[in-house]
Amino acid sequence: MGSLFRSEEMCLAQLFLQSGSAYDCISELGELGLVEFRDLNPSVNSFQRKFVSEIKRCEEMERILGYLLREIKKADIPLPDGGVNPVAPLPKHVLVIMEQLQRLEVELSEVTRNKEKLQKNLLELTEYTHMLRITRNFVHRSAEREPLQAQYEEFPFLEKDTMMDYTSMQRLGAKLGFVSGLIQRVKIEAFERMLWRVCKGYTILSYSEIDESLEDPDTGELTKSVVFLISYWGDQIGQKVKKICDCYHCHLYPYPNSNEERKDVVEGLKTRIQDLHTVLHRTEDYLKQVLNKASESVYTWVIQVKKMKAIYHILNLCSFDVTNKCLIAEVWCPVNDLPALRRALEEGSRKSGATVPSFVNCIPTTDTPPTLIRTNKFTSGFQNIVEAYGVGNYREVNPAPYTIITFPFLFAVMFGDLGHGVIMALFALWMVLCENNRKLKRTRNEIWNTFFEGRYIILMMGLFSVYTGLIYNDCFSKSLNIFGSGWSVRAMFTEKHWTDEILRTNALLTLDPNVTGVFKGPYPLGIDPIWNLASNRLTFLNSYKMKMSVILGIIHMSFGVILGVFNHLHFRKKFNLYLVFLPELLFLLCLFGYLVFMIVYKWLAFTVQDSSEAPSILIHFINMFLMQGDAVQPLFPGQTGLQVFLVVIAVLSVPVLLLGKPVYLYWLHHGGGSLGTYRGYERVRRSSEEELSLMRAHDMEEGVSHRDHSPSRESQPEEFDFADVFLHQSIHTIEYCLGCISNTASYLRLWALSLAHAQLSEVLWAMVMRVGLRVATRVGIIFLVPVFGLFAVLTVSILLVMEGLSAFLHALRLHWVEFQNKFYSGNGVKFVPFAFSLLPSSFEHDGLLPHIKDARADGSITSRCRDCLRAECMCVNAFDAECIPDRTWPTARTPLRDASPRHSPLRRGGQRSGRAEDSLPRTAPSDAAPCPDRLLSPPPLPTRLS
């Protein structure tokens, strides 16, 4: 809970990795995901770094793996279950994997190329066969079958002699030529027009469409083709025809000169096609065997190459020492994970067999650490809601623990319905019970993934909706009379207030609670069910829900202001308690807190007997600002004086909020000497004008002389800019004072959406279910089935999905704008640990591989213990799979400021030599100091590194 309330304490550490064991140490850190590396070579080009050749080798292996995966997917071969997590291969085994992949690629590419050639030859022979079959009667065709075909006037006897062939026409001096082939059906019209325009009518085009579809060798799609036969006269026309065919990408085939030659060609084609089918079938079987063999190991290879590439990328972020035998890396690491970090380095050194162990040393820094908040599968959804507004600053109060309660509660206030809440809770409960189902987790439907990742949020919203539904006594727009109504009609007749004549002459009757026996007492839970029958039900609910919304809003905002106290105390800004927090709280409570007091007082002070004399709260609240308390009847004695006092306090708090902080910082800055460190160590925070003044004040309170610290010419504080501080505080004051009014009005959305949801539910019941229930005959039972189905569909689609999404967005706005801006800045940087399980893969994005979930989150891969680093461990500090933050490894990241390598001399205990930049003040608390010496004492540096 401590980590969820506030981000974990971080420290900047240096890793000293021996050259022989650096690869194994980084591999161990990648398996655990404990640290975030910094780039110590920001000025070095990516192509000029140490391990560029190894990364290029990994990219080449990724290219081969991508080729294998595409071929496996094309062959529709299922990949094995992705429940393996191989370790990163050793550098000496990389060449073996590379050789296997290259040999497999050559073999697969050769077989694939042969298969494509065979398929292309088979397609050509098939097209040639179709061409010979269809063009058989294009020239020798009787006039009865083709009455529209053009005839040659020079040889009219050709119509009668159906057996005349090409040789006979050549003997007659016709000089005819033929071009035959296939063309796509969509091009035939343009092809015919082009022939007519270019050849001036000296050609005869005959064509017919093929019945079956043929596969396009380039795209692999089935296309419709047309067989054509062009008869031309003259060699020049023939050259033009062939050029036109080339432009339209026609497949040309030789046309036989005689019928005997045609028969011989057809017989030869049949034999060759049969042989090609046999060879192609054997080739496909062999290709499938090769792909099946590759599919058994491709998943393992993908993970190994991904890990290996990530390791070399991290090694490129490191810098070498002067001897080039030791790599130095800088990492952000949670203080609680430092023992596990040291054990990981020891494990990596042991695996590599290095004689000199690698070690870690904590160093002071002025950079702002990243924010790490550990979550589990329950709290991660609520943490994502908070971080969608912005990642919290380092060690800032985290709103997520309170959002777990307030977010579903405010949603339920707007969505409150017992029946709808039960449906939502059951749906979410089903997702929670089936959360380990891989089919539900690995679907590529983004909408479903959104619902599934937020299953615990939906469950909480459903449960809270059931509670508010009981309070509203609303279930599908109907009330439940569980405990019996507290109102009785019998007493109105007993006391002679209602008579038969009154019943006949009045359509609406009013129950008088002043009559004895009419009102027995309040309903035990929620609203009395008799209000569901009352004609003034909407008026009553309007008043009730509007006041309830104001009360909840003031409480929610006041709680947000109070949470800011923890930030002021943690960052040791005590002056903010008096100059910021106190004026803000007084302004809010003196005005709107008093409004809540009047609402509650009116509920308690006025009974049934004097309820008609109760004054209007709205009029009193307006007169409070106009100073006209005597114009209306007071709500309680002394109300006018109290209201004047509260308005004066609220008005006086505004100049205090506006001028207090800038004036105090100005006085603090000009009232003393230079600043030094606080309590002997630097804070992990960037200095600012406000923080420098604050540190100086603390040193004065502690009695610390700044002359005791080493002088620093490099860390002279910048000149204090009063105008900048005053402008910032002015904006904050205006935003807060106006925001108190607008934010209070914004909470009225709780009232509006609650009434809208109730009215939509009532309209849906009246227009659908009531129609089916009113059919009193036997047909009504059959008619009720489709009516209920329509009612169920409309309830789920409109009231659950649409109204639920609307209430969700409004609850989100109330937390982001009205609640979180009171204490949460959200300007931090997210902690992104180096973890293999968080690395993205281009194969997953392209759909070649299923999405690889975090192995530690779904339990498919055994996690390692933080203490003993073993896969199976029973120790009490075993690695908690649910504490890993759900992060995404970035493809590119801007280096942090001041990321230059620090190679200062080190001493025992992780302390650095006294330098000027080591005495810069910071505003982080004392718990951000370097870690204890017992955890960080490195072994003495050897005189010679082997």
Image: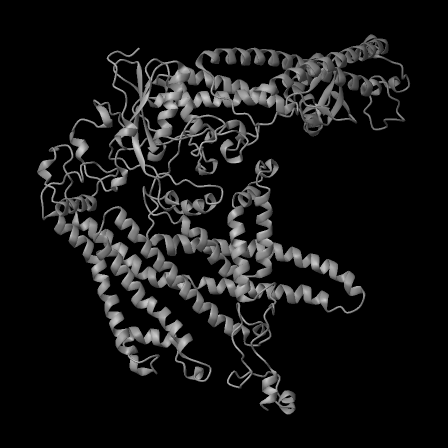
| Residue at position x 25%, y 74% in the image | 644
Above or below 358: residue 385: below
User: Which one is nearer the viewer's eye here, 684 or 132?
Assistant: 684
Q: Position of residue 462 (x, y in %)?
A: 54, 54
User: Which one is nearer the viewer's eye here, 31 or 754?
Assistant: 31
Q: Position of residue 520 (x, y in %)?
A: 54, 79
Is residue 799 visible in the rendered structure shown here? Answer: no
Q: Position of residue 736 (x, y in %)?
A: 30, 58
37 left or right of 793?
left
Name the quarter where the N terminus is drawn: top left
Name the quarter where the C terminus is drawn: top left
User: Which one is nearer the viewer's eye here, 836 or 11?
Assistant: 11
Above or below 795: residue 627: below
Above or below 645: residue 126: above
| Residue at position x 76%, y 13% in the image | 278
Is residue 170 visible in the rendered structure shown here? Answer: yes
Above or below 685: residue 666: below
